[in-house]
């Protein structure tokens, strides 16, 4: 009898044991569009739920206000110690439409409305150096990278030599430490169109699609365009606090009210919950980028690339999850904040 009970007990313990939070690195061009801010809020909510652990945030937006804004969001959600890395000589140095509106907002006394750990002009690590250091410290095959900006940082990572952080060159370090890459990138139904994240740094996109050693799951332009984040959610679902940096960013980005595409949010949802059936995953394929910055699909049963899509039913489920996760309050209200 014992020989039957022991396997059953082991199975029961395995089922009851909570899964270890997924180790995540978020690479973003926050400041160019507001969906990055919502995606970062989602990651903090997922971390609060014990589903992931945000190891680092690396920026392809080369502006000090992008650093400060990221620090504001991390601090707001109670995770202010998460390291931030900034791209060197990035493609979009301008401050954008909402970064300064949030990072420089003041209350009636003149104090910063949103506390942060870093000063506005604080020096932070180079993004590629932070990527190497962070990956080297993780168990093999344990990290999921989410890339919702340009491919600049990740392409440069592939080309790095061994250093003090790791004896492995960049491509080998990625192959050893990364489980998969979830990328908001590409446009496939209109072959003449270019997707912003890809064409802004076309050489980096070409290199990454060619040389990245792990599976890549592409959440294309078409998917996020087909699911709009509703203005009514911004107006109501975030009202658990009097001042919220994400809703302030949303209102500063465009004339409110408006519904905005959920591009970057879809990559976060798939990365952390790939087995929940929110999306349909294509057969293996191979994606390349031509010299015009257009993504090209190639059938390849041995390919490591996959494209996400969704049925109407999946879109309804996924959009509800995006709304609920991005608007979820942290465990405790930020210091100094009160319910309205």
Image: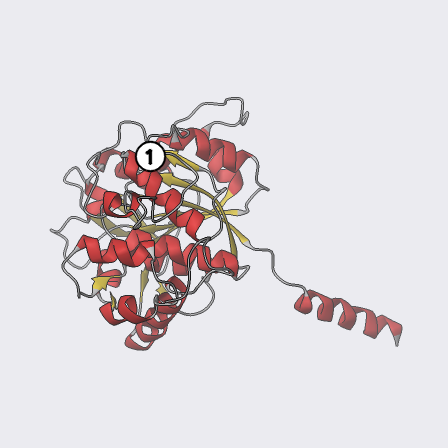
On the image, numbered disc 1 is attached to which residue?
120
Frontmost residue, 243 versus 263: 243
Report the residue that reaches farthest toward the front. 109
Total numbered labels: 1
Q: Does 311 appear above or below 274? A: below
Q: Residue at x 60, y 56 (%)?
A: 20
Q: Residue 213 location in percent, x, y? A: 43, 40
Frontmost residue, 182 versus 2: 182
Q: Quadrant of the N terminus?
A: bottom right
User: Residue 68 lies in what quarter of the image?
Assistant: top left
Lateral position of residue 89 relative to residue 190, left or right: right
**Res. 14 visible in picture:** yes
Report the residue that reaches farthest toward the right. 1
Q: Residue at x 29, y 47 (%)?
A: 106
Q: Residue at x 76, y 66 (%)?
A: 10
Q: Does 119 appear above or below 96? A: above
Q: Residue 77 location in percent, x, y? A: 45, 53
Q: Residue 251 location in percent, x, y? A: 21, 58
Frontmost residue, 269 versus 285: 269
Crowd class of label 1 (few under 14; some 14 to 19; many from 20; radius 10 Å): some
Lateral position of residue 331 relative to residue 84, left or right: right
Q: Quadrant of the C terminus?
A: bottom left
Lateral position of residue 236 relative to residue 5, left or right: left
Q: Secondary structure at mark 1?
A: loop
Q: Residue at x 44, y 47 (%)?
A: 75
**Res. 219 visible in picture:** no
User: Residue 211 lies in what quarter of the image?
Assistant: top left
Q: Residue 149 location in percent, x, y? A: 29, 44
């Amino acid at each position: 009898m014992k020989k039957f009970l022991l396997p059953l007990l082991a199975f029961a313990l395995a089922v009851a044991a909570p899964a270890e939070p997924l180790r995540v690195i978020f690479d973003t061009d926050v400041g160019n569009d507001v969906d990055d801010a919502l995606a970062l809020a989602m990651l903090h909510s997922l971390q609060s739920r014990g589903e992931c652990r945000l190891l680092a945030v690396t920026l392809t937006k080369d502006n000090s206000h992008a650093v400060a804004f990221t620090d504001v969001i991390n601090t707001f959600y109670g995770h202010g110690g998460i390291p931030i890395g900034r791209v060197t000589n990035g493609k979009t140095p301008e401050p954008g439409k909402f970064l300064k509106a949030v990072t420089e907002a003041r209350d009636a006394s003149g104090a910063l409305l949103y506390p942060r750990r870093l000063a506005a002009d604080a020096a932070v690590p180079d993004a590629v150096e932070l990527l190497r250091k962070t990956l080297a410290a993780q168990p093999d095959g344990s990290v999921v990278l989410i890339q919702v900006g340009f491919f600049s940082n990740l392409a440069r990572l592939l080309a790095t030599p061994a250093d003090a952080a790791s004896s492995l060159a960049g491509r080998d370090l990625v192959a050893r430490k990364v489980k998969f890459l979830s990328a908001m990138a590409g446009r496939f139904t209109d072959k003449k169109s270019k997707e912003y994240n890809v064409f802004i740094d076309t050489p980096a996109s070409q290199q990454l699609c060619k040389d990245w050693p792990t599976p890549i799951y592409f959440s294309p332009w078409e998917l996020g365009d087909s699911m709009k984040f509703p203005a009514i959610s911004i107006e109501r679902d975030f009202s658990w606090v009097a001042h919220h940096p994400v809703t302030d960013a949303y209102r500063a980005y465009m004339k409110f009210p408006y519904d905005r595409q959920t591009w970057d949010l879809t990559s976060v949802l798939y990365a952390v919950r790939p087995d929940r059936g929110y999306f349909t995953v294509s057969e293996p394929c191979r994606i390349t980028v031509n010299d015009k910055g257009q993504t090209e699909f190639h059938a390849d049963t041995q390919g490591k690339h996959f494209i996400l899509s969704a049925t109407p039913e999946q879109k309804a489920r996924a959009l509800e999850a995006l709304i609920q996760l991005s608007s979820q309050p942290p465990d405790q209200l930020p210091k100094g904040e009160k319910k309205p």
